[in-house]
Amino acid sequence: MVSRRNFMFAGSVGLAGFGALTNAQLRADEPEITLVPSAEMTPDRELWEKEGRHLRAGVIGTGWYGKSDMFRILQCGGGKVEIAAICDVDSKVMEEAARLAAERQNGKIPAMYRDYREMLANEKLDVCIVSTPDHWHALPGIAAMEAGCDVYLQKPIGVDVIECAALWKTARRLNRVVQVAMQRRSTQLLIDVKKDFIQSGGLGEVHYVNTYCMSHRRNATILEPETPPESLDFDMWLGPAPKNPYYRIIPRGWRSFMEYGNGQIGDMGVHMFDMARWLLDLGWPKRITSNGGKFAFPQSTTTIPDTQCARFDYENLTMEWHHRAWSEVPDRRFYWAAEIFGTKGQLRANSAACDYRTYGGPWKMANTAKEFDRYPSDQTEPGLETNIAGANRAHMWNFLARVIDRGRPVSDIEEGYISAASCILANVSLAMGGASLEWDPENICVKNNPEANKLLAREYRAPWKHPEI
């Protein structure tokens, strides 16, 4: 174990980027923090290593997480997976990804495409990674399944509710394996706490969950339109989204615009909402309500709320989401987290940490261990989120194992549909002034609310056609 006082200097799990802890947070009498690595060998990894076959993989979207997902499938594939083709609307980004892929697969350079439709038509692929911005998840994901691929799909699975439903229905119709990149379900410390504390009754009956994010101040940005770089096909990048100006903050800054995503609840919130659902075995909420807006930075060029509260009502349980882009958070270790309150105990968790206790007892504290000893490349891979690299590997092995045995992955498309659509419905409520939406999952509609149902599918820019269900 590593004491909390020594934790900052232990090296295995540092808090670089989270800010310095106050002296009050570093008291010697605080509980120790256990470092939890991912499992050395899981049944999924064992199945893949024993029965895995050669797979030709394609990657659509080779930016930050596109490259990260590409590296994970090569790393977990153990020489059985070949990145045969990649696609990106930015030739500079794509060429870099092709070079990096070749370095990891004995110099073999993948075929490069600017249009995912050409890639899927010309290449015989077994699996496809879709790591585009949110507004480009549905069309490539559906097209990849129709081309015969199993899909590793970044979250949230779609940018509107009907997109999400169409992805789910396509996967079931074609019997495709689709793993959604919600890696909390593959995070070892959370797997352990679910089994050893939650399922054993340590929480008691749970009636309230608070999920939140107190970070990401991109809302304050004031931008001027610019000319897109020559390497970028900006019209193709926009695709079905509105014809908006180019701002230099793209590639990652697109999250600051509702036209391409769903704000913080669709980015950070979907992870915590999904994590809490998984920990507590919850399905669809019965009612969803949300309020908020651009309160702190009304002059910002960005279009996402800087303040938002949402409520997801279940039977005898309420889950809430809170986001403030303008305030501090008392504990930087949990600037983004879910807090679960039961009748016997409580728990707080995120991608890197999990603390829990029975009432009246001490906190048991755990952090995900960085795995530099087992995977030295984690220290040098550009942009890698090292605290979740182990969960990403476990998630990818789970996907590869399901490609072999045709079972449902841990983050199956249906789970991705429930989590993404629920968070998107919160934004529908927000757009309607905080209307209470009663969701009907069987008929894929809001009960008795035709105005809300008009907002379940966004209008696509021609010539792109919105998927149907």
Image (cartoon, helix red, strand yellow):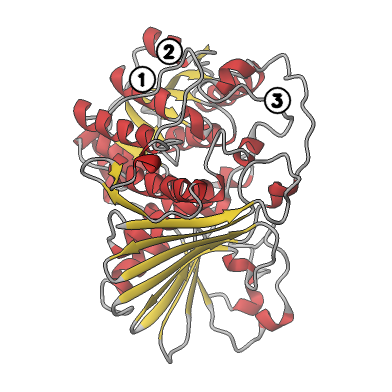
Task: Give above or below for 222 relative to 363.
Answer: above
Q: Report, in whole angstroms, how far the alpha carbon at label 1 lies from the one at label 3.
A: 27 Å
**Which circle's residue, 1 or 3, is located before the other in the chain?**
1
Q: What amino acid type should be assigned to the residue bearing mark 2? A: Arg
Q: Report, in whole angstroms, how far the alpha carbon at label 1 lies from the one at label 2.
A: 8 Å
Question: Which of label 3 and label 2 is nearer to you?
Answer: 3
Q: Which image quarter is the C terminus in?
A: top left
- Residue 210, percent across and down? 46, 68
Horizontal relation, residue 390 to residue 276: left or right = right
Question: Which of label 1 and label 3 is nearer to you?
Answer: 3
- Residue drawn 57% across the image and 48% down it: 385
Q: What amino acid type should be assigned to the residue bearing mark 3? A: Tyr
**Which circle's residue, 1 or 2, is located before the other in the chain?**
2
- Residue drawn 38% across the image and 38% down it: 161
- Residue 381, percent across and down? 61, 40
Which structural element holds mark 2?
Answer: helix
- Mark 3 highlights which residue? 246
- Residue drawn 29% across the image and 19% down it: 146
Task: Give above or below for 122 relative to 245.
Answer: above
- Mark 1 highlights which residue? 143
- Mark 2 highlights which residue? 117
Horizontal relation, residue 7 to residue 465: left or right = right
Which structural element holds mark 3?
Answer: loop
- Residue 39, percent across and down? 38, 56
Residue 82 in view of the camera: no
- Determine whether label 1 and label 2 are within 8 Å by CB: yes
Horizontal relation, residue 99 to residue 265: left or right = right
Which structural element holds mark 1?
Answer: helix
